[in-house]
Amino acid sequence: MERARFYDPRTGVTQEVDVEYYAGEYSESGFWEKIKSKVKSAGLQLIYKAMQLYYATENPNCPTKVKAGIYAALGYFIAPFDFLPDFMPFAGYTDDLSAILLATMMAQAYIDDEVREKSRQKLGEIFGRKILAELSEDQAA
């Protein structure tokens, strides 16, 4: 059983999470449902990074171990019950963001211009083109 550590800045506690469990929580339909329903509460940056991870798995050069880490992070994002419940004001998505950012660092070599463009296109398709203007240059790159 592989475990990952996530830091909760609210409590200052590092929590261990069962990676295999959350990878099992991942489903493509669950991912898109979460993306569409939570953009306002989760925030555009989190949604954009999650989409980049999703599209990075389509890269044929992306190793299985990296894909497994991505699916675990996305499964954690999708899971209704995680370390910090998503409905908690201000802190609910902190742990999800940590998981997504950790996976993004692991997958950085596979998040190229094509992945970023696919993510931007899909954001525009789902939420309308105006939302793309809200992505800062840092987020767009």
Image (cartoon, rainbow, N blue to C red):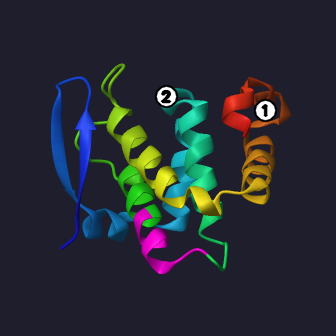
Type of secondary structure dominating the magenta stretch: helix
> Which residue is labeled 1 in the image?
132
Quadrant where the C terminus sits is top right
Residue 115 image offset from top left, x and y in percent: 72, 57
Which quadrant holds residue 88? top left
Residue 41: give its label: 2
* Magenta span: 62-69
Quadrant where the N terminus sits is bottom left
Say which residue appears at 47% left-offset and 67% top-offset: 27
Say which residue appears at 61% left-offset and 61% top-offset: 109
Q: What element carries label 2?
A: helix
Say which residue appears at 65% left-offset and 57% top-offset: 111
Q: Is mark 1 on a helix, strand or loop?
A: helix
Q: Nearer the viewer, residue 128 or 57?
A: 57
Q: Nearer the viewer, residue 58 or 126?
A: 58
**Number of residues whose C-alpha sits closer than 10 Å to that of mark 2, classed few (under 14), some (14–19) or many (20 or more):** some
In-image side of 51 versus 124 (left or right): left
